[in-house]
Image: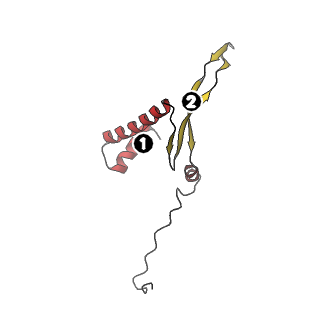
Amino acid sequence: MTKADLIEDVSKAADMSRKDSELIVDTVFESIVQSLRSGEKIEIRGFGSFRTRERNSRVGRNPKTGARVEVPAKRIPYFKPSKELKDVVNGGSARSVPSPPEEAPPDAPAPV
């Protein structure tokens, strides 16, 4: 799925214009980026959490020349899926919500 596909899905689900949907999707992504940039952790219940991890500086090698290259320390974004998301992806249900009671047939006696 691409960002354009996501915008289209939001547009259809919320019955709004594509332009408004694009603004919503862009705002959500920008909020996530700004929070990560400032060192905050983002938790979306039932979906997962975003955070940053520190990578130490290291010495790498240029694969073409074999020369040693100093790779500086940096922060990288990291996503950890929730248990619910893992279950849904693996074929389970999203939540264990009880199903609504079935309606009794019209000729059945009323429950007492």
Rendered position, 3 above or below 54: below
> Which residue in the structure is indicated by mark 2?
76
Q: Is residue 17 left or right of residue 92?
A: left
- Between circles 1 and 2, the one closer to the viewer is 2
Q: Quadrant of residue 5?
A: top left
Horizontal arrangement in the rendering, residue 33 relative to residue 92 (left or right)? left
Percent from the top left, x then y, of residue 89? 56, 50
Q: Amino acid at mark 1?
A: Leu
Q: Is residue 71 above or below residue 47?
A: above
Q: Where does the C terminus fall, quadrant-wise?
A: bottom left
Q: Secondary structure at mark 1?
A: helix
Q: Residues within 10 Å of mark 2 (few under 14, many from 20)?
A: few
Residue at left 64%, top 16%? Answer: 70
Whether the residues at callouts 1 and 2 have beta carbons within 8 Å, the answer is no
State the mark number for residue 77: none
Residue wearing tag 1: 6
Among the two numbered marks 1 and 2 on one chain, the one whose residue lies closer to the N terminus: 1
User: Closer to the camera, 97 or 12?
Assistant: 97
Residue 72 vertical position relative to residue 31 in the rendered view, above or below: above
